[in-house]
């Protein structure tokens, strides 16, 4: 059996078409959804991510502002810029690209963003809302994973989901989102003693540790859904995930590729969050 591929590019295209329609409806009412992206320093990977985010905004009818600053930018200056964007009615979402230079406290910067504009879903208020099941912005990568499961009509109720990784950006919010859909969730990490014993029980595995081949074919239950969040390079320098794709696709029922899987979905859910922030903005709400 060869697994069905969950095509993140095709699903992204569908979701972005919906974003473009909703953005056009807002523009007809005089509101252009706006995203501000702040990039501090010259990190090459960050520059690529930021460029892709800005292009995706423009392609979907959203307004984007890219602000570039040198790595020497002071923390107080960055916090002041975030505060100014919080007050700007033309900006509905604020994204500070991570990582930040070592002299800047990333947590402090994220907490300075208004929760109403926290389209990355990293603010403590957003995390708390997810924790207790209240409305709020979900972190884009796990949100994209949930959309991929939804796209194949997968009912998580009563299923056992194993999340490999416990980061605040993917692992922890992923576990909470799966719980919301009534899955039984196990979170594995570097302290887990027998990872294979856990994953062999799983109906769904989400691999999100940034380590090549952390999940191999002998660790997967036949027919399981495998979501690969990892972004690594193989020995030839080609992009690959956390999952041994060639081996696991012969066992799994569904699998996401790298590239072309979760990656495009992350940026797409950023667009969705920004659009929803614009739809919920006071000026829009009052004119509805």
Image (cartoon, rainbow, N blue to C red):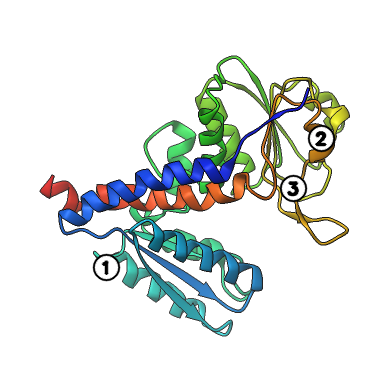
Measuring from the top left, give residue 16's x and y in whole percent.
42, 48
- Which residue is tagged 1? 88
Q: Is residue 44 above or below residue 233?
A: below
What residue is shown at x 69% (from left), y 21% (from top)?
203
Q: Is residue 135 above or below residue 120?
A: above
Tell me, for residue 192, which label it has, or none: 2
Mark 2 element type? loop
What residue is shown at x 84% (from left), y 43% (from top)?
213
Earlier in the chain: of badge 2 and badge 1, it is 1
How far apart are the alpha carbons under marks 2 and 1? Answer: 46 Å
Earlier in the chain: of badge 3 and badge 2, it is 2
Q: Are marks 3 and 2 in contact (CB under 8 Å)?
A: no
Mark 1 element type? loop
- Which residue is tagged 3? 241
Measuring from the top left, give residue 63's x and y in whole percent.
33, 64
Report if residue 239 is visible in the image.
Answer: yes
Along the horizontal axis of the image, is 271 left or right of 194?
Answer: left
């Amino acid at each position: 059996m060869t697994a069905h591929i969950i095509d993140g590019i095709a699903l992204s295209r569908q979701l972005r078409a919906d974003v473009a329609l909703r953005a056009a409806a807002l523009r007809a009412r005089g509101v252009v959804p706006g995203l501000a992206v702040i990039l501090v320093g010259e990190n090459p990977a960050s520059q690529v991510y930021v460029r892709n985010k800005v292009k995706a905004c423009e392609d979907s009818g959203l307004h984007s502002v890219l602000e570039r600053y040198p790595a020497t930018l002071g923390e107080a200056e960055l916090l002041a810029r975030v505060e100014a964007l919080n007050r700007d009615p033309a900006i509905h979402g604020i994204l500070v690209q991570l990582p930040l230079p070592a002299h800047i406290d990333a947590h402090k910067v994220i907490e300075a963003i208004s929760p109403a504009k926290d389209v990355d879903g990293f603010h403590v208020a957003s995390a708390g809302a997810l924790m207790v099941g209240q409305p709020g912005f979900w972190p884009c990568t796990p949100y994209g994973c949930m959309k991929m499961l939804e796209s194949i009509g997968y009912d998580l109720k009563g299923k056992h989901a194993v999340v490999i990784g416990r980061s605040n950006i993917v692992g922890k919010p992923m576990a909470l989102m799966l719980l919301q859909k009534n899955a039984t969730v196990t979170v594995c990490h570097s302290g887990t003693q027998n990872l294979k014993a856990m994953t062999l029980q799983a109906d769904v595995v989400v691999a999100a540790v940034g380590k090549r081949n952390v999940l191999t074919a002998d660790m997967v239950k036949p027919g399981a859904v495998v979501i690969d969040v990892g972004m690594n390079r193989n020995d030839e320098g080609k992009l690959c995930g956390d999952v041994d794709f060639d081996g696991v696709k012969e066992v799994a029922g569904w699998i996401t590729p790298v590239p072309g899987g979760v990656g495009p979905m992350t940026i797409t859910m950023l667009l969705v969050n920004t659009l929803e922030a614009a739809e919920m903005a006071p000026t829009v709400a009052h004119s509805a």
